[in-house]
Amino acid sequence: MSNRPSGRAADVLRNTHLEPGIARHAEGSCLIRMGDTEVRCTASVETKVPPFLRGSGQGWVTAEYGMLPRATHTRGDREAARGKQSGRTQEIQRLIGRSLRAVTDLKAMGEMSVVLDCDVITADGGTRCASITGAWVALHLAFRHCLKANIIATMPLKDQVAAISCGLWQGTPVLDLDYAEDSKADTDANFVLTGRGGLVEIQGTAEAEPFSEAQLLDLLRLARHGTARLFQAQRTACGLG
């Protein structure tokens, strides 16, 4: 019997579903559900690049992230109403952008941009990881739209990218933390991995006692196990088998 609050075994993901094409007007979109966490990801194609890339022949992929006011158990103010984004929001959207650019051939895009908007509808842990995983589907569908419209000649995506949280719960490495686990875990880590096994980013924090190198490798093994399932879910959502 599991001692996790969710009752899941240590290496079991929450129920995960990726629904493509949920936004009528966006070139690419995906609604990702991981347990009770829900994130709406849309990809918007723009025929311009940031000033530092003008004349370079290179494209750009960037992201914006936000939580709807009642995504959590109490209402949070819209950041637009406060006049500025929180440090957490800026950190997460930069992470999403970096993760997607890591698997994109920006030269193959030409001078165009894709903006990924990741809006958290319901938060129950792992929102940044769900955003990255769902945003890849939205980006793939946007590039497919551009291919059909002869905006680009080849698919710029070089690989898949997905992310998953892992942690130490009562000394045991566990996969895909929900909020009840994340808020009380001994260690909390996020892993951004590519389909070919590359590491894009690892964020790990000891909430109590320091964790060991061996425990980090245990968490990485769990992350690879979890992202293998996420990669398959992405392929299914994109009709790639």
Image (cartoon, helix red, strand yellow):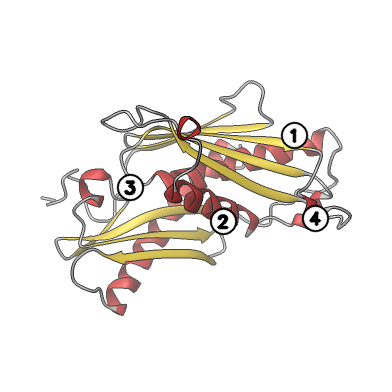
User: Which is in the foreground here, disc 4 or disc 1?
Assistant: 4
Residue at numbered disc 4: 53
| Mark 3 secondary-structure assignment | loop
Q: Of the residues shown, which amino acid type is indicated by label 4? A: Leu
User: Which is in the foreground here, disc 3 or disc 4?
Assistant: 4
Residue at numbered disc 2: 99
| Mark 1 secondary-structure assignment | helix
Report the Cα–Cα distance between label 2 and label 1: 21 Å
* Residue 61, horizontal then vertical, whole percent: 68, 49
| Mark 2 secondary-structure assignment | helix
Report the Cα–Cα distance between label 3 and label 1: 31 Å
- On screen, residue 142 versus residue 205, left or right, reads right
Q: Of the residues shown, which amino acid type is indicated by label 3? A: Leu
Q: Of the residues shown, which amino acid type is indicated by label 2? A: Ser
**In the foreground, 58 or 19:** 58
Residue at numbered disc 1: 145
- On screen, residue 192 versus residue 184, left or right, reads right
Q: Of the residues shown, which amino acid type is indicated by label 1? A: His
* Residue 45, horizontal then vertical, whole percent: 73, 36
User: Which is in the foreground here, disc 3 or disc 2?
Assistant: 2
Q: Earlier in the sequence, mark 3 or mark 1?
A: 3
* Residue 191, horizontal then vertical, whole percent: 43, 60
